[in-house]
Image (cartoon, rainbow, N blue to C red):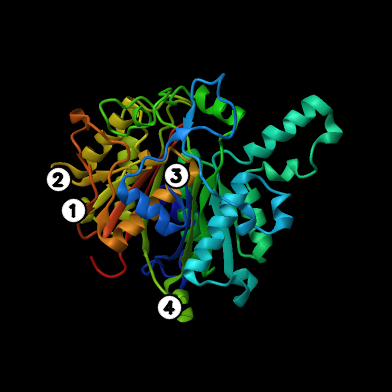
Amino acid sequence: MNAAVEASVATAAGPAYRDGSPQAPVRPVVTGLGVLAPSGIGTEEYWASTLRGELKIAPISRFDTTWYDATLAGEVAGFAVEDYVDKRYIVQTDRWTWFGMAASRLAMTDARYDPAAHDPYATSVVFGSGSGGVDIGQRELGRLWTRGRTAVSVYQSIAWFYAATTGQTSIRYGLKGPSGVLVSDGAGGIDSLAQARRIIRRGTPTVLAGGAEASLTPYAIAGHLSGGRVSTATVAADGYKPFDVRANGYLPGEGGATLVLEDPAAAAARGAPHVYGEIAGYAATHDAAHHERPAPDARWLATAMRRALRDASLTPDDVDVVFADGAGSPDLDAQEAAAIRTVFGARTVPVTAPQGFVGRLLAGGSALTVAAALLSIRDGVIPAVGNLDTPDPAHGLDLVRTPRRVPVRVALVNARGYGGFNSSLVVRAVGPC
């Protein structure tokens, strides 16, 4: 959504900012992170694995892949749902919702935020979703075909739905603030954070946002394969390789992240233990070119990046690192590289894409990348591009090969969704740059 459209929507829906003044936009702060990823359950486990450069792609274990061209993925290992989700919700929900609810619990614990201590209308939930409940869908369709309609679970109708994680999280904690779901494939995690910002600017002090996915089932993998961009490598190191000369497509993964976003005044008033950074700018565009093929050039991704920086009142010179979408297909990587060069001109900015270590997690992936950007700001280190061996010189980028210890105050995060979605988010350390 560009700045003009965002302004028109805000005008139609009510005041755009907490105090009603367009001169003083509220910039939400991130006070909690909750991560479930192939590289670890919990933020610190994920981050340590990422900085060690551990490749977490492996043969799919959740079903027999004999008849599939793609056999590798990033799976979340060691996840015990009963440790994070109440039993009554486990039977009603799908694996992707388990991940989302677990990540939310971890994020609120990290933020020391207890929604029960606040007015029920003071907390909202907005998640991105790219696949919905494919695990329960696979199982219940199998029952329908083999045993008839009476064998289908009564929860099938609600557990597969894109809004299930938002709804069940709201119910679990009694959260009555304005909530929703964003469905824009891989861009959904970033788009959910932008929607959270709008909600906070309109008066709700706290929002849970982000996304988590679990699209590793037979029919989900068939869906991935139908797009024609999945790597058919049989060795993990040969698979998903963003910006590499051997880039040959992506490998899917599961997991994601929940972020606790708060009005900065509300966070200060309750004594939030830490602030990872602020949501400083956002913009989104659409290629409007084709329902499957990408646009012929990079102008609309570049436009999203420029508008996000303008929204943050920053210039390309202020950016310390770009966390790229890193699609892993030669043409899409080349297009994103062209957009980065267009925006930054002669300036060389470090570029990374740590998702190469874990796979593409749809909406969960862009939420996870934002978490990585905030951790980069916290620790002053840029993680390496995942599974990068030989950077393609044609891209003309400063691709981070090993963790780079440098001060990071501003990070620009890109995410793209199948069908033409482009989203860019600016996260910044709290305080002047």
Label 3–label 2 contact, CB within 8 A: no
Q: Is mark 1 on a helix, strand or loop?
A: helix
Measure the alpha-carbon separation of dots 3 and 2.
Answer: 27 Å
Q: Which of marks 3 and 2 is in front?
A: 3
Q: Is residue 386 above or below residue 249?
A: below
Is residue 422 toward the left or the right of residue 154 in the image?
left
Question: So how many labels did they put on this image?
Answer: 4
Q: Which of marks 1 and 3 is in front?
A: 3
**Amino acid under disc 4:** Ala
Measure the alpha-carbon separation of dots 2 and 4.
Answer: 37 Å
Measure the alpha-carbon separation of dots 1 and 3.
Answer: 26 Å
**Among the two numbered marks 4 and 1 on one chain, the one whose residue lies closer to the N terminus:** 4
**Amino acid under disc 3:** Gly
In front here: 372 or 235? 235
Q: Which of marks 3 and 4 is in front?
A: 3
**Among the two numbered marks 1 and 3 on one chain, the one whose residue lies closer to the N terminus:** 1
Is residue 268 toward the left or the right of residue 216 in the image?
left
- Which residue is disc 2 drawn over? 347
In front here: 148 or 425? 148
**Amino acid under disc 1:** Asp
**Among the two numbered marks 3 and 4 on one chain, the one whose residue lies closer to the N terminus:** 4
Measure the alpha-carbon separation of dots 3 and 4.
Answer: 29 Å
Farthest residue to the right: give it.
150
- Which residue is disc 1 drawn over? 317
Label 2–label 4 contact, CB within 8 A: no
Measure the alpha-carbon separation of dots 4 and 1.
Answer: 30 Å
- Which residue is disc 3 drawn over? 365
**Amino acid under disc 2:** Arg
- Which residue is disc 4 drawn over? 268
